[in-house]
Image: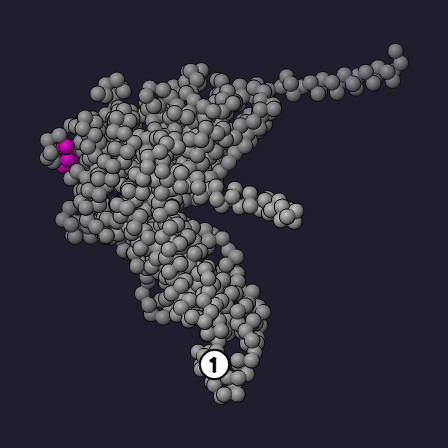
Amino acid sequence: MLDSRYKHIFLLPALLALVAIIIFPLIYTVRLSLSGWDVNFPELDYIGWDNYARAITDGRFWDSMGTLYLMVLLCVVFEYLLGFGLALLLWKEVKAGRFFRVLFIVPMCVTPVVMAVVWRTIFHETLGPMNDVLSWFGIPGVPWLSKSGPAFAAVVIIDVWQWTSFMFILLLAGLMSLPREPYEAAQIDGAGPIRTFVHVTFPLMAPITLGALIIRLIESSKLMETIYALTSGGPGSSTETTSYLLYIRGLREFQIGYTASLSIIYLAIMIIALTIFARSLSRLMIGRQGPVRV
Amino acid sequence: MQPRTVLAAGVLGAVGVAMAMPAFAETDYVAKYGIKQDHPGICSYEATDAKDYTGHEITILTHAVPVMGEPVALHSKQFEELTGGTVNVVHAPFGELYQKVMIPFQTGQHVYDIVYGGSYWIGDWAPHLAAVPQKYLDTDEMKDITPAYQGVASWNGQRLQYTFDGDRNYFKYILPPFEDADNQAKFKAEYGRDLAVPTTWEEYAEVATFFSGWDWDGDGELEYGSTEIVKRDDVAFANFITRVASYAKNPNVTGGFWFDLETMTPQVNNPGFVKGLEMWMDALRYMPPGGINFGIGEEIFSWGGGESLMSVTWDDAFIQAMQPDSPIRNKIRVGTEYGPSMGSHKVWNRVSGQWDEFETPSVAPYVTWGWGAGVSKYSEEQEMAFDWFCFFSNYANTNHDLLIGRFGVNPFRTSHMDPDYWEQEAGWDRAVAESFTVMLQGMDTSTNRVFDLRVPGVNQFYTAMMASVAKAMAGEMTAQDALDEVAEEWTRIADRIGVDVIRDAYKNVVALEDNVSLDQVQ
């Protein structure tokens, strides 16, 4: 009995910190979302569900959500494929392997806003090196930031460049921790590299792949800094993601109450979507034997 | 008395006199601070030196270096040296200034004593700013401010912002290509008329098209017709306003450019606005590659670097292009024979619902917001803060700052409209100086001007406007559809904030547009 009391006393500081850092802001955001706090009315009044009703008819919000999902999907798929490929390359001993491992981590260490500014220069249509490089291969200059499609692609390229290394680290760590026995068995059975990959490596990597994908999906869905520094959501509305719109609505327009409601809706959708996605992927990759709880 | 004692007394006396000397000698502010002349008055270096703010401290929120951030940092350091007080300068990018000011204002916290931002935020800031005390309004520096910028700094008849800058959007161009005989002959052959500095957007489009996509200055690079600020969520709204003003601000109609003050119906989708936007959409074809993504930095770099023939934006690009190291220094001019920017032979009349015809182009100058700043009414150091402003914008400092393009300080006093100043102090050619000052004067005396919306929630109105305009510019929708979308959104915003609140605030803007007193606006 006494031990149990001590246990709770020791847990209390951590619980209080948790409440202060996570629970309170969340509850406060919900409360704000039920208020009409605006640039001209900085009061925590109560307006019921008006903000939520308004959000349902806010076409710009739903358009930004569509843009975000497409962008995130492309980013994460490319990051996974490239990250896995690089991890497989460096899994076996290669020359200067340690150097490459460090090199691949560098992009992840750079601040996204800084990189967006650098990439803006790279994508400059007349002065940037990207179009110069393309011209070596006879490819005409691409209007990277002035047409909707290329601008969208530019954002994806930057995200893939920056975060492939994250996928690479996780997957490489996973590969290095795989047991040797299944590979010895496959070798005895005469399996070639492709069959070994398909029937041994890929299934064994499924849990860590799932974890890596979920983490990147969550992180990518917060894509904002790159948009802010590179395209400001344009041209037109082609790169306006939900996070960027929330920034505009909240901190540029100062629609605090309404933005809080958008944030709550966004959070709810993300939780539901990621839960469904994780379960589906878990069934697909791991089957019923080893479900991963997310 | 022993000789040694006499000698010691003499040395001590000499040391004492030497130590006392600085107290009696006049400080040479000109040499010490690199100013041309210290003008007498309560804001002067000498008067500021006489103030003692030892133990006092103010915090200023201003823009990032260099634009406005650099002069604020420079003069704050000088103010500290002169008064013994402490001045903390916090820099932030333009996109963050609004929120950094509004959060403490709305939550009633005292964070900044002085805040900088767009002067068009005055509708949101007004409840939180301290009025400028009369003793500062009585200074020569304040009385010399042009009526337009006195108006920009005022709200409901009260001066709330301390004026130190005057911005405007106007037409500027590189002159030699217009004077080139070959260009003139080719242009005449192509368009059937003489090559001349354009006076309407239609002429502008022709000239810009003619000069787009070939190397007309012989530097081995391609040049283009026009550079403007088009990037979404940058300050592209200013270029949009300049474009539409020519077709939508009618000199025969008073009582509101943005809204009809009587009915509070948004005018943003009337045929004048639509025509202006259509012309702007068409302009992308004669802008440099990537022009749709040009912010103010790219515009200054592009036009100032000689990449395009013409531009219609802020003073900053022009002043920077007149810096000694500029490739187009003294080769540029501003304004047309009819006014600071392009005009139009037909302007929409929202009262009659028809286009009015004008024999000579009707010009509607846009007095672009410019920097605004004020003292927080929650500040406990208001006297020091106003003294800082007084010093910051004294004659000596302003005359120094005006000549440095990157500082972002632009003409705002009547004395700045003297071509002699620009010729003698800045080393401009007489023709450039006259072109510039005539344009400035034309803007100030015009009775058909456009100002920013300047009402509470202006950012909501502007971001809604520019989100839809950006879609039109990117080809996602037509000009009419985009502006209809804006009008619907503006109606919703006005309803949320309160139509009467917006109307009362908008009266301040209409007074500026029609160049009349606030009392005359019904």
Disc 1 marks which residue? Answer: A196
**For residue B351, above or below residue A276:** above
Nearer to the camera, B464 or B279 = B464
Query: Is residue B13 located in the magenta-colored stretch of the structure?
Result: no
Q: Which quadrant, please, contains the C terminus of chain B?
A: top left
- Classify residue B26 by image quadrant: top right
Q: Secondary structure at mark 1?
A: helix
| Chief secondary structure of the magenta portion | strand
Provide the chain ID for the residue under circle 1: A
**For residue B25, above or below residue B190:** above
- Classify residue A75 by image quadrant: bottom left
Q: Residues within 10 Å of mark 1 (few under 14, many from 20)?
A: some
Q: Which quadrant, please, contains the N terminus of chain B?
A: top right
* Residue farthest front in this picture: A1
For the point 35% across and 30% down, the residue is: A41
**For residue B20, above or below residue A151:** above
Nearer to the camera, B88 or B282 = B88
> x and y percent of residue A273 in the render?
37, 57
Is residue A84 in sight in this rendering? no
Q: Amino acid at mark 1?
A: Thr
> x and y percent of residue B287 in the render?
28, 50
For the point 36% across and 38% down, the residue is: A34
* Stretch of the chain drawn in magenta: B346-350
Nearer to the camera, B177 or A46 = A46
For the point 47% across and 85% down, the residue is: A192
Is residue A211 in sight in this rendering? yes
Decide if residue B186 is on the left or right side of residue B142.
Answer: left
> x and y percent of residue B53 in the render?
58, 22
- Classify residue B317 by image quadrant: top left
* Residue farthest top in this picture: B1
For the point 15% across and 39% down, the residue is: B271
